[in-house]
Structures are given as structure tokens and as C-alpha cells.
Image (cartoon, rainbow, N blue to C red):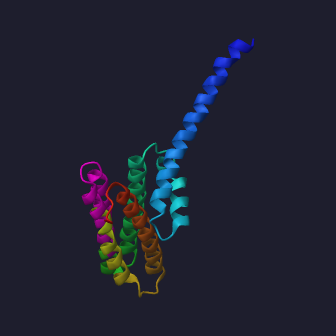
């Protein structure tokens, strides 16, 4: 009886060990990314809560996941600013400019994801320039006191945190420091 349970026990042990190695790889990459972000707690919480980052088996997968989180959020922001522009005729032009800025962020992050394997330095640049667009959004609506502008500002501050994570992630593949 004991001999037949040994192979099962070994299989369970191997499965648990492989799971541990996978978690260990993603945790190391997440820790490496978050060491270079101002809000480390937010970074760790964000990446560990996102299944593609938490289950990544190598640094490249974790970096890709970090870019994807930022891209997804930028698309959410773009849709919100588009809806807001339609609902607020007095400020339509400002909100349309915000929508355009978020569209450029989405496109830049898509480019970053596409360049990751071929040209990590270009990918890093594509992520970094996104802050030019968030600065423009802040300049457009930052002084406004209406609910929609305040919401866009909160979204933009969150976008900056996600851009910082994506930038730190791409730095792992292309260190910008000598």
C-alpha cells in the first residue's frame, strides 16, 4: 500500500515546488520593478493583484504585464474623457483635448509593448513620453473645479503612478543608469 502512494506524494511535491518557483520568479521581478518607484506599496499591490504579473515566470512577462496595466487604464481614461466631452458642451474642447492626450498615451504604450523584445530602449522611451501627455491634461483641467475635471485629475494622477511602474519595468530590460 505504501509503495503505491509514493509516486502520488512525489507528484504533489513536484507540483508544489514548481508553483513555488513560478511565484518566486514573479515576486523577484515585481520587487525589482517596485524598488525604482516612489510609491512602492502601490506598485507591489498593483502588480501582485494583476494575474499576468503575479503569475509571470520571467522578467519579460512581468514587464509586459506592467505595460498592459498602464495601457488598459489609459484606455479607460480615454473613454471617460470622450463621454465627458459629449456631456459637457461648455468644456467640450478641453475634454476632447484630454481625450486626444489619452489616445496618445494608449498608442505610446502599445508601441512600447510592441518594441519590448526588439528595442527595449525604444520601449522605455515610449513609456517615458507618456508623462508629457499627463502634464498636458493637468494643464487643461487642473484648475477647474467641476466634478468631471476633478475626476479626470484623479485619473491622471493614477495614470502617472502606472506610467512610473511601466517605466521602472522597462528599465529592467534597458537600464537607463550607467
Quadrant showing the C terminus: bottom left
Magenta residues? 98-125
Classify residue 157 as left or right of residue 41: left
Confirm whether the magenta stretch covers residue 110: yes
Residue 158's spot in the image, x, y percent?
46, 70
Residue at the front extreme of this rendering: 178
For the residue pair 61 and 36, the one nearer the viewer reads as 36
Q: Does the magenta stretch mainly form a helix, a strand or a loop?
A: helix
- Residue 116 appears in the figure: yes
Confirm whether the magenta stretch covers residue 151: no
Residue at the right extreme of this rendering: 1
Classify residue 23 as left or right of residue 165: right
**Residue at coordinates 29% horizontally, 69% vertically from top-left?**
129
* Location of residue 90 (image quadrant): bottom left
**Residue at coordinates 58% horizontally, 35% vertically from top-left?**
17
Residue 119's spot in the image, x, y percent?
24, 53
For the residue pair 17 and 148, the one nearer the viewer reads as 17
Residue 78's spot in the image, x, y percent?
36, 66
Amino acid at each position: 500500500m505504501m509503495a503505491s502512494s509514493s509516486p502520488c506524494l512525489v507528484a504533489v511535491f513536484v507540483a508544489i515546488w514548481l508553483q513555488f518557483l513560478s511565484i518566486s520568479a514573479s515576486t523577484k521581478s515585481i520587487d525589482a520593478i517596485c524598488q525604482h518607484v516612489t510609491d512602492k506599496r502601490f506598485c507591489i499591490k498593483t502588480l501582485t493583484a494583476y494575474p499576468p504579473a503575479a503569475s509571470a515566470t520571467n522578467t519579460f512577462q512581468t514587464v509586459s504585464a506592467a505595460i498592459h496595466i498602464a495601457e488598459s487604464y489609459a484606455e479607460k481614461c480615454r473613454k471617460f474623457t470622450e463621454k465627458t466631452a459629449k456631456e459637457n458642451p461648455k468644456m467640450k474642447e478641453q475634454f476632447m483635448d484630454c481625450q486626444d492626450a489619452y489616445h496618445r498615451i494608449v498608442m505610446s504604450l502599445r508601441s512600447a509593448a510592441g518594441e519590448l523584445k526588439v528595442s527595449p530602449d525604444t520601449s522605455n522611451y515610449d513609456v517615458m513620453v507618456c508623462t508629457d501627455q499627463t502634464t498636458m491634461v493637468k494643464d487643461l483641467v487642473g484648475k477647474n473645479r467641476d466634478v468631471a475635471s476633478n475626476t479626470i485629475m484623479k485619473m491622471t494622477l493614477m495614470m502617472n503612478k502606472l506610467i512610473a511602474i511601466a517605466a521602472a519595468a522597462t528599465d529592467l530590460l534597458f537600464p537607463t543608469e550607467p
